Amino acid sequence: MASARSRNAVEQFRHESLGDVGSTNTVCMERARAGDPGRLWITARRQLGGRGRRGRAWISEAGNLYASLLLIDPAPISALGSLPIAVALALYRAVSAEMPFAGDRLAIKWPNDILIDGKKLSGILIEAENLPDGRHAVVIGCGINIAHRPDNPLYPSITLSEAGAATSPEKLFAHLMQELAEVLSLWDEGRGVVAVVQAWKRHVKGIGSPITVNLPERSISGIFSAIEDDGLLQLRLPTGELMRIASGDVFFS
């Protein structure tokens, strides 16, 4: 059973379940512009215009989990860079609750993709906007492949069904809502980032391995040397130089 502390954490959030929407992220941002105080989850049966990072399409057929959380002024702007790590930790824990048999099949690919058997299970899209009334809206969008996955993904993908987990969007969302409430409490507006990163990096795949990181303007290869306390990836280049990377798409060699 959930502890009293866990129940208190999740009770601070509201949830609205919808049918077909363009995008749960878009619905959340519209609510923010209309004055919503935040801590609002929007889930949908299906997205008609789902999107991933850098404008990529996200397959959104019924049967998967599509969920977005609206936060208002969740932390100083300077602290928001570590928010994807907190979300990834919560996603990992939510999936793990439905796959207790997974063991080391389940991992995190820096910074925030969840992998099963080395294949991508989920995506996170975080968007932010300064509102006219001076508030700062942050929307955390999470998509998890339960029954469907892309046919031609940028990175090999998998569904929970293919991985042997029998669950539903509703059951998985219940875990996600609980886990993210707890992790955001630990993150504590960025003040608890070191504790979050320490918990998160125990599940990160590939430290010590050769990788290629695709950045917007170029690709860089080297050795995945470490994860720093702020969540940045440390890449050792062939020259021996250490490069700190804040965001990018990681591919294992």
Image (tube, rainbow, N blue to C red):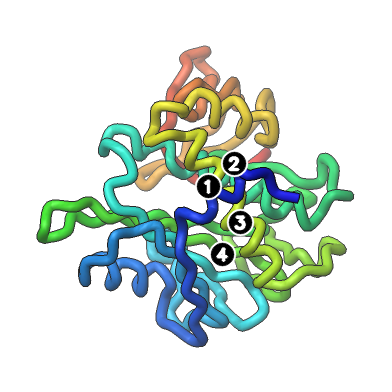
> Disc 2 marks which residue?
5
Q: Quadrant of residue 123?
A: bottom right
Nearest to the observer: residue 3 or residue 167: 3
Task: First in sequence, mark 3 or 2: give its number.
Answer: 2
Residue 180 picture location, percent across and down: 55, 49
Q: Nearer the viewer, mark 3 or mark 1?
A: 1
Tags 2 and 1 in contact by the CB under 8 Å rule?
yes
Nearest to the observer: residue 159 or residue 136: 136
Task: First in sequence, mark 1 or 4: give its number.
Answer: 1
Q: CA distance from mark 3 to mark 4?
A: 11 Å
Residue at 49 percent across and 68 percent down: it is: 15
Local secondary structure at mark 1: helix
Q: Nearer the viewer, mark 1 or mark 4?
A: 1
Task: First in sequence, mark 4 or 2: give its number.
Answer: 2
- Give the farthest residue toward the top: 240
Local secondary structure at mark 3: helix
196 vs 135, left or right, is: right
Local secondary structure at mark 2: helix
Q: CA distance from mark 3 to mark 1?
A: 13 Å
Task: First in sequence, mark 3 or 4: give its number.
Answer: 4
Q: Nearer the viewer, mark 3 or mark 4?
A: 3
Q: CA distance from mark 3 to mark 2?
A: 16 Å
Up the image or down, 13 lies above or below 57; here it is: above
> Disc 1 marks which residue?
9
Tags 3 and 1 in contact by the CB under 8 Å rule?
no
Residue at 57 percent across and 60 percent down: it is: 154
Task: First in sequence, mark 3 or 1: give its number.
Answer: 1
Residue at 47 percent across and 74 percent down: it is: 16
> Disc 4 marks which residue?
143
Q: CA distance from mark 1 to mark 4?
A: 22 Å
Local secondary structure at mark 4: strand
Q: Which mark is residue 176?
A: 3
